[in-house]
Amino acid sequence: MSSNTPRLTDPRRLAGLILGVVAVFAVGVAATLVAKSRTARVEVTGPATSSADLRIKEVELEEVAGGVRWRLKAEQALVFEQEGRTALKKIAVSVVQRDRSWTIVGEEGDLFRQTSNVEIRRNVVLTSNDGLQLETSVLRWQGAEGRLWTDAPVRLSRDGAVVNGTALDVRVGDERTTVAGRVRATFTRSPRR
């Protein structure tokens, strides 16, 4: 009889999966938004409702780098040159590598050009093609530290395994994933496929 241990319990696999998605997202979005913001077609939609230097409607960016293809779609991007920040609304990111893929969605977020740090907020869901799903209200990537984290409640699930906690900290360099706070894990046997 073989062991049916869920793959979700392997912190190295989880850390690598989350790192791949966020690293590709952060670097790609930072580089592309800076380049595209200078040449993007801007549609005037009426009086400005913000102090943004540039407002872009229906943003779609795609890049292939290092064997990874990613595509970012957002209903709106507001570029704040002075702050070095780009605010995004209704974000959907897809990341495709040779052997796996992910999608990340959120209602809003910020990209900080100087640091390549990213924050995605409100109904954030990361889903991988192997069934891993991460749900939270805010997810942050700090590029210099190789850290993906949230101090908001988080839910990780795959193949009948569900882990809930009040915070998540992934240290990519150490291949360490910590679900903190009041943690609850439930493991149920998935029906065989």
Image (spheres, rainbow, N blue to C red):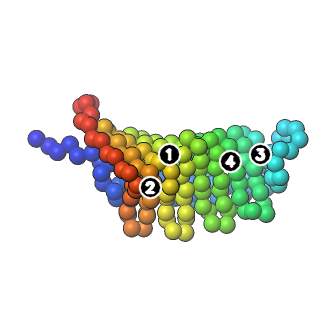
- Disc 2: which residue: 168
Label 3 amino acid? Ile
Determine crowd level at label 4: few under 14, some 14-19, many 20+ residues with C-alpha closer than 10 A: many
Residue 188, above or below 172: above
Alpha carbon of mark 2 to alpha carbon of mark 1: how far?
A: 10 Å
Label 2 vs 1, first from the N-terminus? 1
Label 2 amino acid? Leu
Alpha carbon of mark 1 to alpha carbon of mark 3: how far?
A: 27 Å
- Disc 1: which residue: 136
Q: Is residue 166 visible?
A: yes
Looking at the rendering, which quadrant does residue 172 occupy?
bottom left
- Disc 3: which residue: 56
Label 1 vs 3, first from the N-terminus? 3
Q: Is residue 96 visible?
A: no
Of helix, strand and loop, which one carries label 2? Answer: strand
Q: Residue at x 71, y 58 (%)?
A: 85
Question: Is residue 100 shown left or right of residue 139?
Answer: left
Nearer the observer: mark 1 or 3; the answer is 1
The N terminus appears in which quarter of the rendering? top left
Q: Position of residue 53 (x, y in %)?
A: 82, 54
